[in-house]
Image: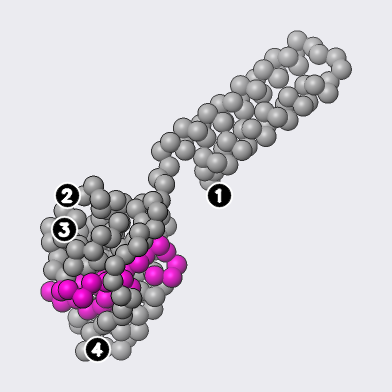
Amino acid sequence: MGFNAKSLILVGTIIFIFQIANFISIETITPELERAQVLAAIASLIIILIGFLFKQFEPVAGEKVDLKGENNFFFDRNMPDEVIDELAWGSEAILTSTAAAAILIHNDGANILRRGITSSNKFEPGETCLRSIKDMKLISLANTKFYPGRDEFFNFCADIPSILVVPINNKAFILIGGWSAKCFTKSDEKWINNWSKKINNIFSKNKI
């Protein structure tokens, strides 16, 4: 497991304290010991410095936004049971195991699933969503406040602070909105991206 900024600072501090305590407890100080103590002190300070540098670049999730809207669950009842079951299970997993507040699945011009805090307005994909399915690449908008094309998502969930657009195939995608800015992790993105591939296989099997 990798170290984050806080753990690096903690480890460096503990090493520094231990080597100071060790130096104080020694009765006879030799030149070799002095050099070893200096190197140990420098090493611990470098670890602490690296921790502070990492802290500057670590994304910090923003405060949870009080989103306007009702908690809904709509889906196309004309879909095969296998598709409904998979989308129901996956959307529930996303909403309960990540910081997602809303999810929409769009396929070939139709919104086949909407779940969470979503708008009752009809959502039409714009430039960002179309680019995602064209390039078949996940698009992460960590903070929509600074995104010039944020109006595209107003009919998905008004004032949603962060968004993931995950392509399923060249005509379908998953749209996920987060409760706060910078709230989705790389692990979230990875498993949602893998789920999108599973959905594509199910769509193909059921000729959707």
For mark 1, give the secondary structure: loop
The amino acid sitting under disc 2 is Pro
Mark positioned earlier in the residue sequence (4 or 3): 4
For mark 4, give the secondary structure: loop
The amino acid sitting under disc 4 is Arg
Quarter of the rendering occupied by the C terminus:
bottom left
Identify the residue under disc 2: 148
Q: Residue at x 17, y 73 (%)?
A: 121
Residue 138 showing in the rendered view: no
Out of 143 and 136, give the one closest to the viewer: 143
Specify the label residue 151 is tagged with.
3
| Disc 1 residue crowd, few under 14, some 14–19, many 20+, Cα 10 Å | few
Using the rendered view, name the quadrant where residue 21 is placed: top right
> Picture coordinates of residue 75 (x, y %)?
26, 82
Using the rendered view, name the quadrant where residue 6 is placed: top right
> Picture coordinates of residue 67 (x, y %)?
31, 64
- Which span of residues is magenta-colored? 95-122
| Disc 2 residue crowd, few under 14, some 14–19, many 20+, Cα 10 Å | few
Mark positioned earlier in the residue sequence (1 or 4): 1
Residue that extends furthest to the right in the rendered view of this protein: 27
Identify the residue under disc 4: 77
For mark 3, give the secondary structure: helix
Q: Residue at x 51, y 40 (%)?
A: 5
Mark positioned earlier in the residue sequence (1 or 2): 1
Residue 65 showing in the rendered view: yes
Whole-number angstrom distance, CA of label 3 to CA of label 1: 39 Å
